[in-house]
Amino acid sequence: MAAVDGHELVIERGAGVHVWDTDGKRYLDGAASLWYCNVGHGRREIADAIAAQQGRLAAYHVFGDVANPPALELAETLAALAPVPGSKVFLTSGGADSIDTAGKLARLWHAVRGEPARTFLLSREHAYHGTHGIATSILGMPYRDGFGTLVADTAQVAWDDAGALEETIVRLGPERVAAFVFEPVIGAGGVLVPPDGYLDEVTAICRRHGVLTIADAVINGFGRIGEWFGVERYGLEPDLIVFAKGVTSGYLPLGGVVAAPRVAEPFWAETGRPFSHGATYSGHPTCCAAALANIALLRQDDLVHRARELEGRFHAALRALEAHPLVAEVRGGVGLMAAVALEPDVVAADLAAPTRLWRAARDAGLLTRWIRDGVGLAPPLVVEDEHVAAMVDALATALDAV
Ligand SMILES: Cc1ncc(COP(=O)(O)O)c(C=O)c1O
């Protein structure tokens, strides 16, 4: 806090792929804020939908048998978009909320089916899943220390090795493993595209050992990698899908979990078991109205598929930066997500080098996300080629400054 106190970047306005600070300086929003502003800033349609819903019913809970029209419509819309027909949707307030929801649901699912010892939640190194209880406990990034005892029964596996997952399941005993949580393309952990066949292999391993698959589509979803939930890109049908961010493009906070029918079934059966879990703002009507308006825009402008159209040109343009002596590689290639990674010896000699690059890019008018070895990029899906060219120019300037 000492470093930022008095030096805050105060953003006050946004339109399309740009935002402005209180001094009137314009920035290209190269990371769509925190990987979420998929439809771009300043979309009137979402603001109007929010205002209209506030005028009708700003907020009401959805506990017990209580519902509201936007929550019902959103749940039905998302279930219809889900890869497995007949899926059910549980709404929350964000990403980590949803990870915790999915983790508890996975454990309870096994318990109600007579396997209460299946409690282990496995995740990948470099994974980011948020900062709630379970989410913190399964992080593959170094943000777990200093908080005392975290949630028990978690284990981490290499991010890119399906064999390591199977070894861990066998070592722990499959009868103790509840679920494997994975981002199809890892985002905040460095934009790591899975090796060919990896996601099919881990899915088969989980099926073989009775372990549920939980896809974290918080960044990958809603067009970021060219599909509604991102998992479709790899032909996956996960047992649970966690979403947030792009579902509202961040206009209001909302997340949720899609449960495939076989996971939902014990909780929907006549003699079913309740899932005693929910948050004050689950199914918040105004947040749901924002999501519906956002989804309408994604459809209207076909933004869900736009990343696929642009990804080749986007990555080709960014890869030109590999010619810079400080750059080790430009990672990505799937959707509008990329990382410009600095040479390992540069980062080893100066751990602050990624933040200095991020800062220099900002000085050059480009907002990025700093990651462990460089900066991450995920512009709004309304980005045009000219903006991509401006991103590359700003990064080249920033690299020279670093
Ligand atoms: C992949 C992934 N999962 C979960 C989360 C947590 O979401 P939230 O910050 O809304 O809790 C994030 C946030 O960046 C994320 O990138």
Image: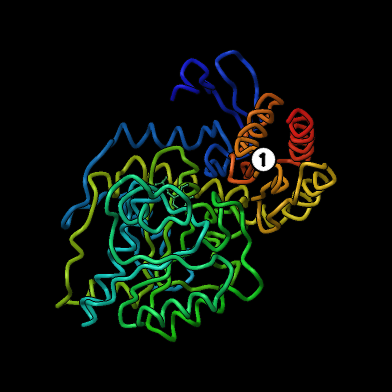
Residue receiving disc 1: 349
Q: Nearer the viewer, residue 184 or 163?
A: 163
Determine the image quadrant of residue 19: top right
Determine the image quadrant of residue 115: bottom left
Q: How far across and how far down the image is residue 397, in percent?
A: 78, 30
Q: How many marks overall? A: 1
Q: Which of 144 and 9 is in front in this view?
A: 144
Determine the residue positioned at 71% across, 42% down.
346
Q: How far across and how far down the image is residue 353, in percent?
A: 65, 36
Screen quadrant of the N terminus: top left
Determine the residue positioned at 41% across, 83% down.
170
Q: How far across and how far down the image is residue 227, in percent?
A: 58, 60
Label 1 amino acid? Ala
Q: Can residue 381 be seen in this view?
A: no
From the viewer's perspective, tell me whether residue 155 is left or right of residue 109. Answer: right
Q: Is mark 1 on a helix, strand or loop?
A: helix
Q: In this view, does 380 lie above or below 271?
A: above
Q: Residue furthest front?
A: 349
Q: Is residue 197 visible?
A: yes
Determine the residue positioned at 48% across, 80% down.
166
Screen quadrant of the C terminus: top right
